[in-house]
Image: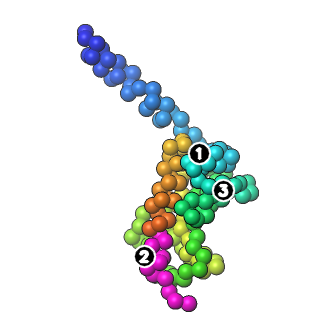
Amino acid sequence: MTKVVMASVLVLVLGPGPAYAAESECLMKGYKLEDLATILRGEGYGTVELVGDDRIRFKAEGSTFLLLLYGDGDLQLYFGLSGPRVGADDINEWNRTKRLARAYIDTEKDPVIEADLLANAGLNQAIVTEFVGTFVKTLVPAYRQFIGERRRAE
């Protein structure tokens, strides 16, 4: 058997290799808050600070975000805009036409957006990093623009 054929047989029998196996085997049911803070710092987010036992406040793209850790390992990202007023119809339009995050008007009448990452299928650093990056760099800028277009005079 040639070396190429032998290598192909090994890949078929043993799997695609250690890099893929390491990634798929490193799924965890959850992270400690301190470990999540370390991940955020490693991704270059600024002013990462623990707030109580279940949340991290961090800065990115000139804004402040909250990352909440639930007892079952699930994560939730939160971002709120203070000041602009929009109606329930506008928020409903966002929720009807967008994916990956939900919006609502909080008790102070400010528009906020949240997204959840469920831990029941397992988490790893790559999954957490992608979740945060998508929220910070894609969803929140789109939400800001959406709210800006629908802002009502007070």
The foreground one among 43 and 14 is 43
Quadrant the C terminus occupies: bottom right
Which of the numbered marks, if any, corresponds to residue 93? Answer: 2
Label 1 packing within 10 angstroms: few (<14), some (14-19), many (20+): few
Task: Looking at this view, name the residue that lies furthest to the top.
Answer: 1
Q: Are marks 3 and 2 in contact (CB under 8 Å)?
A: no
Identify residue type, mark 3.
Thr
From the image, state whether disc 3 or disc 2 is nearer to you. Answer: 3
Report the span colored magenta.
Answer: 143-154
Picture residue at 26% right of the left edge, 16% below the top:
5
**Label 3, label 2: how many angstroms apart (C-alpha)?**
33 Å
Identify residue type, mark 1.
Gly
Residue 90 makes an appearance in the image? no
Which residue is the site of mark 3? 47
Which residue is the site of mark 1? 42
Q: Position of residue 51 (x, y in %)?
A: 72, 58
**Label 1, label 2: how many angstroms apart (C-alpha)?**
36 Å
Identify residue type, mark 2.
Glu
Quadrant the N terminus occupies: top left
SS at circle 2:
helix
